Amino acid sequence: MAVGAVSVLSATATAGPPASAQPLHPDTGCPDPGPDLLSVSRDLFDQYRRLGQLSPPGALLPVLAEQTRALGDLAARCGARTRPGLLNLSARYAEFVGWMAQEAGDDAAALGWTDDAVRLAEEAGDPDLAAYALTRRALISYYRGDAADAISLASAACSPRLPVRIRGLAAQHVGQAHALAGDRAACLRHLDQARTLLDADRPDPATPQLGTTHLVDPITMITGWCLVDLGRPREAAAVLDEACTRLPAHALRTRARYGIRRALAHARSGEVDHACALIRDLIPAVQTADSATIRLDVRRLARTLARFRNSQAVADLSPVLTAALHPHGG
């Protein structure tokens, strides 16, 4: 599918001054379209991230993959003032493709695209994405249930020489992995570190932000998430109840992810009817997201609710929950 390539190349047709007025690439003799091409491509990236909240990952993967390749091809045809920016943006596209591949349940493809993102960033002269890639690999290990590997990978991205945002995200993932391992003190210590670092971050509006952009207070939300893993569902429910009210309406994937974790906290607290009501409201977002990582919590939720077979709310919800777990009829 060439949708991504068409969108970039069509955009460049109207970007910048006429070709005759543009500086030529010293090797190819092609016009260098300059900063307008990068600006248009960046705007497209923001739109694709928004689409990623509203669409199943499988629908976006071919488009994003082609967009990544198209930007790399365009970078090769541009001069020194435009090429690094395009390569860097291509790296961000590749990292996003990796996340969508993970959401589609293909961890091998996710790791492959993450490796491509690192290579593209290094070509652009940005070695820091390699450290961020460690946090992405840590998250894959986390979802696989391998706390030790997740701690090891994310800890390697905590070096003081790295940008503060990467260190903050790394500390967050270390905290999540410690929660998975049942170590409350280590979890909360690293989440405190993450909060300090992320609060100190000053994003560059010209550069796509690493990590989530849909959480107003990510560490509070992640704290609620971790309290579920730590076996403290009542505390988790209280934190997630408040944090979920601040999620933007358009962020369906994010709402499904944290909403299901919130419902799991309530179910494990014995508030079964309330959990079922929360889930019923979330089902459309869960089905839209079609996320392998979200379904992990849906399965945990189904196992928890199975202990309350005499509940009418559970009986009524059961077929809906089963459909959410098997969106393709499998």
Image (cartoon, rainbow, N blue to C red):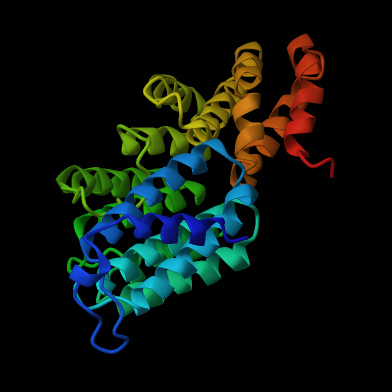
Report the front residue among 68 and 235: 68
The residue depicted at 61 percent of the width and 18 percent of the height is 281
Counting from the top left corner in percent of width and height, residue 72 is at 41, 72
The residue depicted at 79 percent of the width and 14 percent of the height is 316
Counting from the top left corner in percent of width and height, residue 114 is at 47, 67
Q: Horizontally, is 142 left or right of 304 in the view?
A: left
Q: Quadrant of the C terminus?
A: top right
Q: Residue furthest bottom?
A: 27
Q: Horizontally, is 102 left or right of 160 in the view?
A: right
User: Would you place residue 98 above or below residue 200 in this image?
Assistant: below
The residue depicted at 34 percent of the width and 62 percent of the height is 89
The residue depicted at 81 percent of the width and 16 percent of the height is 315
User: Would you place residue 21 above or below residue 173 in this image?
Assistant: below
Counting from the top left corner in percent of width and height, residue 284 is at 64, 25
Q: Horizontally, is 28 left or right of 112 in the view?
A: left
User: Would you place residue 308 above or below residue 19 in this image?
Assistant: above
User: Would you place residue 234 above or below residue 98 in this image?
Assistant: above
